[in-house]
Amino acid sequence: MQQPVKGGAVNNQHQHKEERLLIIEKTYDMLKYADQCVTQFPKKERYRTATGIMQCAWNIMDLFLEARYPERRMVALQRADIELDKLRYKIRFAMELTFLPFNKYETLASMVDEIGRMLGAWKKRLK
């Protein structure tokens, strides 16, 4: 439950914790959707391309979980930013080679973009 502070404002620390949990939930949703997408890749691409996409997605989740600990936060968030860039290129590659239908690419890319915006806001608050 959110604790009001003087003037009726919500406790900022509690709000930031909820936002960190939201980015983990959004990443989890993206992982589930990405898994559904890559299982439909041609058999020979399931190992190469699909594994690369899923590994990046799991790396992002791992880094967000790591970033919950203050002593590791900024490094983990910077590494997550790099992994998001890798993931963007890998899903684009899959779409351009027609392993990933365009409508699924759009959905997955918008999920990744939303996570990226949330990550950027988190990093900005830490500076």
Image (cartoon, rainbow, N blue to C red):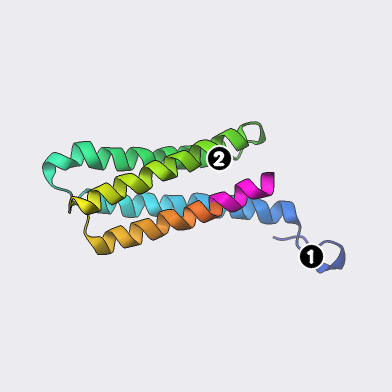
**Residue at image location 42% in from the left, 37% down from the top:** 59
**Residue at image location 25% in from the left, 42% down from the top:** 50
Q: Which residue is mark 1?
A: 9
Whichever of callouts 2 and 1 sits on the residue coming sooner in the sequence is: 1
- Name the element at disc 1: loop
Q: What x and y, as percent, mark residue 1? A: 69, 60
Tell which tag, 2 or 1, sits nearer the viewer. 2
Tag 2: amino acid: Leu
In this view, the residue in front, 4 or 26, is 26
Q: What x and y, as percent, mark residue 119? A: 55, 49
In this view, the residue in front, 58 or 100, is 100
Question: Does the magenta portion include 114?
Answer: no
Contact check, label 2 and label 1, Cβ < 8 Å: no
- Name the element at disc 2: helix
Q: Which residue is mark 2?
A: 77
Q: Which residues are magenta?
A: 119-127
Question: Does the magenta portion include 125?
Answer: yes
